[in-house]
Image (cartoon, rainbow, N blue to C red):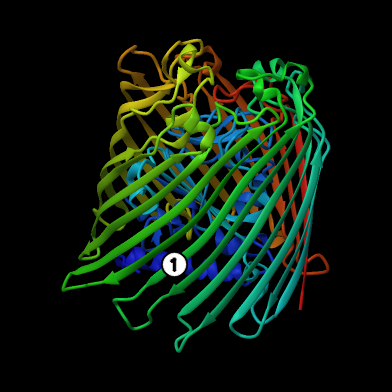
Amino acid sequence: MARLPSARRGHLLLTVTTAALIAAQPGALAAQEAENAFTLLGRLVFGWGTPKVVIDTPQAVTVLDQQDLDREQPRSIGDLFANVPGVQAAGASARALGQAFNIRGIGNAEQTSSQNRIIVTVDGAVKFFEQYRTGSFFGDPELYKRVEVLRGPASSTLYGSGAIGGVVNFTTKDATDFIPEGQTGAVRFKGSYDSNGDGTVGTVTLAQKLGANADLLASFSTGNSGDMKDGAGDTIQATAGERWSGLIKGNYHFGEANDQRLTFSLSRTDSDLDKAAVAQTGGSVASYFGTSDLHAIDDTVTLTYAHEGAGNPWLNLNATLSYSKTSTERDTFSLGAYCSPGSYQVLCPNTASYETTALKVENTIEMSRGAWENYITLGAQLSHQNRFATSSLGALAFHPGGTEDKLGLYLQGEFVWNDRLTITPGLRADRSWLSPDSAAAAAGGTDQSGTAVSPKIAALYELNDSWGVFGSLARTERMPTLDELYQSDGRGAAGRTPSLNLDKEKATTIEVGLTYQTQGLLSEGDSLTAKATLFHNDLTDLIAANPSGSVNVPYFHNIDSAKIWGGEIEAAYEAERWFSQLAYSKVKSKDDATGKTLTDTPAENIALTLGAKFPDQGLRTGWRVQGFSGITTASSTTSGTGFAVHDLFVTWAPQDGALQGLEVNLAVENVFDRDYRNNLSLDNAPGRNVKLSLAKAITW
């Protein structure tokens, strides 16, 4: 791990110690005060390269941990990002299967032309799903203890060319998160309730040490909810459903210095929605296409081997073999009488899936000399993806099947001079081979291949122990996907045809920023951290669909160019009795051909949290206001008016007595029952919602 200046080395050491303390507690809240020795920007990020404190990373990064997830009590992925600048969900406001990620105006709920623009991983396995208005990520938030969001294309080096928006990494829970130091096992019971929709969730987690060097976790969660209502009291249609999830995860440490590790993780989320909207993403088309019964299964399996190479600067190896499959089954359509070839085939019983097997191997070498500490990471990533879809009438022209094989090679350096200047260059090349299935080939699809290259350079200079400046220049290319190459209307020359002559999308991004951190600002032991970022993204050859009804033209085409630019501020203050947090984001964009704001651009927004802590009682309480300005984009669907919404929360974790080990989280969202719609959501947001979760751990 790269060393830091004296103050920052202590900061990092204390952060690592805090992480160890949390792991030694029955639950995250039991170690809340230790965790809050630092603000959000003082947490460790593992997805950049060698582990770094967030504020010392030359990229806009946010880390959410178990404490954040417990407090938010997320029902869907969109609930996670209220305090993360530049990141939110797009699509449905409340449907678990109707959302996708949007980072700085990149990403939309349709997901057409979106694969690889934002890369999402679970325990290192890449996740993606695209089907007509269904959403992209189906994992149950109950599975995860940590979410890292790396904004911007500088992450393409380690994760894959084309990550214009950035990367979202999910990490599942481990047995050591629940077992206190000196004990060998724990069982934790958790129950949650949402007043809006009468939703309930129950979770049982068993954690056990198997000797001195191994541990095993098994967790099961199940929940259901009725339809939710918006602030006007109107039902948000088809938001009811049931879901269960399970996780089995084990770790085994071995080797002379105990510096080798095997980790196995298996998780499944199973969602069963009766009379679900065919257009899960919501909006006016939700009623137009009616309902169907929807069954979705999301599986992730990973096997990781890590060798830290104690005492060997040439060895720090990490290899992950992963398997991911996300699939849906739809039947019992309310408008099934319209099932027919062509676009109305979406109303026929159908199945769809993405299945990906991948191997990622990387090794970090330390080559320090004099005042320089140098780390070089070399890696290779190989994957095979199978995309499948069919209906009762056969293949779906608008959801073509096929396979994609990809080989990526990458190199990243981290060069630290005199504990003050950090320079991080990187280069990645991905080679893709795509083949249509028989139905897509019959419609005109042919084998395609291509290479995408992503170079970058990033740097951070620490002016002193409080101030730092950073910047990056990154360029990435995104190859056309199976969907973009082979999708058609299924009418031959009478409609839109496969798009076999698409160019790669290209993005060049400049990012500059300023960091600040200090302690003892207003009182002894308090901490203030802040990070401000400006970015400018030039996009060329963007891939977009030709209008519906076009005749004898490719389904997709390249548009000339567009620009996205803006700024973010992330700041937090922690003291013995008080805390606050600020997340601000402003994203501007322009289609160079039309001069209009791009459709997926989020409105300017701010989230401010103020709270109080009562350490002797293990109690925290706070208030958060989120404000969004009005925005007009190129589409009336994603234009919207401004609004503000208020939330309250209380967390209680008694540290002694008969209630020790109890964790209580109470939140009231949209306190004033405001009727509003986020411009990237296609239906109204839920009205007032009281959330309550109770958890209790028993250890031995």
Q: Residue at x 51, y 29 (%)?
A: 108
| Dot 1 alpha-carbon crowd within 10 angstroms: few under 14, some 14 to 19, many 20 or more | many
- Nearer to the camera, 445 or 335: 445
- Compared to residue 414, the image places residue 503 above or below, namely above
> Where does the C terminus fall, quadrant-wise?
bottom right
Q: Is residue 323 left or right of residue 683?
A: left
Q: Position of residue 547 (x, y in %)?
A: 47, 13
- The image quadrant that residue 404 belongs to is top left
Residue of label 1: 319
- Compared to residue 283, the image places residue 149 above or below, namely below
Q: Is mark 1 on a helix, strand or loop?
A: strand
Q: Position of residue 582 (x, y in %)?
A: 49, 39
| Amino acid bearing label 1 | Ala
- Compared to residue 568, the image places residue 655 above or below, namely below
Q: Residue furthest left?
A: 370
The answer to whether residue 621 is visible is no
- Nearer to the camera, 627 or 517: 627
Q: Residue at x 57, y 50 (%)?
A: 578
Q: Where is residue 627 in the image (x, y as percent from the top left)?
A: 55, 27
Q: Residue at x 61, y 28 (%)?
A: 133
- Compared to residue 217, the image places residue 241 above or below, namely above
Q: Is residue 47 left or right of residue 77?
A: left
- Nearer to the camera, 158 or 206: 158
Q: Where is residue 548 in the image (x, y as percent from the top left)?
A: 51, 13
> Where does the N terminus fall, quadrant-wise?
bottom left
